[in-house]
Amino acid sequence: MALPDSPLDWVGRLSRQHDVELPKLRALNDEYELLSPRSYMHPEIFREIGDRLQQVVIAWPQLVVDSVEERLDPEGFRLPDQDSGDDELWKVWQENNADEGSQLGRVDALVMKRSFVCVGAGDDPDTPLITFESPLEMYADIDPRDRTVRAALRRWVDPEASPSLPSGPQLITSHAGVRYATLYLPNSTHWFENGTEVDRDEHSLGAVPVTPVVNRARLTDWLGRSELGPVLPLAHAANKIATDMMVAAEFVALPLRGIFGIGPQDIEDASGNKMTALQAIMGRLLTFPDEDGTAKHFEFASANLANFHDSINQLARLVASIAGLPPHYLGLTTENPPSADSIRSAEMRLVKRAERKQVPFGGAYERTMRLVKRFQDGDWDPRYRRLETIWRDPSTPTIAQKADAAVKLNNLPKPIVPLRQTREDLGYTDAQIARMETEDSKAAAQDPLAQIADQLSQRPGALSAAAA
């Protein structure tokens, strides 16, 4: 298919492609927000109970997504030949509140296959603008040859500008109905209002300043896949069973009692008041009038709800195995409390999943920061092709374990890792390490013997030679 010739043609093409995907994206978003429709429920139940039946929703979709995202924390950007992170890039990241924005973007990517990061000119030339966008509002056209973005479109509706329209991203089927849109092309950015171009910026960047953050991309599908896909059938089944349990609790969880020989009008309380309909329902009482006036009582045993518990627990085990979650995350515990080692062993798959996410997500952030550097310098810096994202350790070792391992590696006769790397392994930030190194320098300047020893330790064999 030939590429569009004009910006307006690009808007039409991207709008149509986005409209096809919007219903699926909205459905996935509803699953994460626990607004999923009732599944596997028999129509007779609705006719019998009507509006009184409220679905019980178990928050497994949120658990699956949040358990991974909670372990994804970028802490900086660094070139391979730098001892510490790039302060300038991290400054831009922080001034754009990208810690919060990137977290929201990762959640959207895990739920709805992808999110987007946009870079633009800010009020300060040294601080380009970074924004994180939802796939409900933005769509990008990917070049199948080199996987780069050929064009991207963001559409939204302003409820203040059009009070008759509902708020939030709208399913717009033609660019004539678009309230606002921004089209990003390699050398220009265009702004539209109601299908009419109102402004443009000929920036001649040479690249679309939009980077997709894609989850679970495949070689033939670079738009990504949702983290919820494999677990949604199990979550729907658990919601159905939990709802059935509440229906059973309403009707058969209490013993059903009956009396032959009398009717409801014959039952009074201690004050002589007739039994009400609510009392009859809550009492679970059946009455069968008998002509001879003899009253005989009987009782049906209450239902055992443990069968529902067992079914939900079995589904929870399947979710844990598919999503790589530790069993205790889903409430599957044993009588014996787990040890610290067993907990870390159970979290191994979850940690590995988080490390796998760091690769594509980190790649998206690195491409974003290359664009930031391009906006700052006015030209591409080839050194930043080797930029890497610094991530916090996604595992959960104890402080004592981390400290013990780091100190052992540094205190060997010939240290395997330098002191700075040891401090990074212990989780200290670049700013904290810089303050430590400043204090180390001050202490060394005040202690000549320590200074001499430090200099000798930097030369292999020098200390032994001095001792001889």
Image: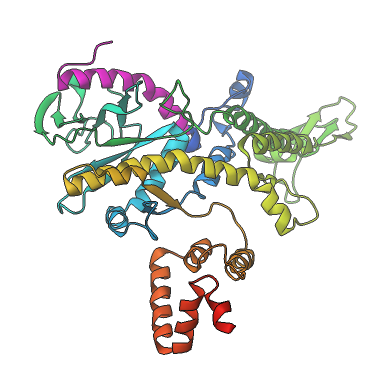
149 or 323: nearer the eye? 149
Task: Tell me the quarter of the picture where residue 318 sits.
Answer: top right
Q: Which residue: 36% across, 51% down?
A: 79
Task: Tell me the quarter of the picture where residue 431 sits.
Answer: bottom left
Q: Position of residue 315 (x, y in %)?
A: 69, 33
Residue 385 in the figure: left or right of residue 247: left
Say above or below: 358 vs 197: below
Q: Is residue 9 magenta?
A: yes
Q: Is residue 96 magenta?
A: no
Q: Position of residue 438 (x, y in %)?
A: 38, 76
Residue 401 in the figure: left or right of residue 292: left
Residue 359 in the figure: left or right of residue 87: right
Q: Which residue: 82% across, 33% down?
A: 258
Q: Which residue: 43% across, 84% down?
A: 443
Colour treatment of the image: rainbow
Residue 29 appears in the picture as rendered: no
Q: Which residue: 42% across, 69% down?
A: 433
Residue 268 appears in the picture as rendered: yes
Q: Position of residue 244 (x, y in %)?
A: 67, 31
Q: Position of residue 185 (x, y in %)?
A: 20, 29
264 or 66: nearer the eye? 66
Quarter the N terminus occupies: top left
Q: Which residues are magenta?
A: 1-30
47 or 67: nearer the eye? 67
Task: Tell me the quarter of the picture where residue 243 sits.
Answer: top right
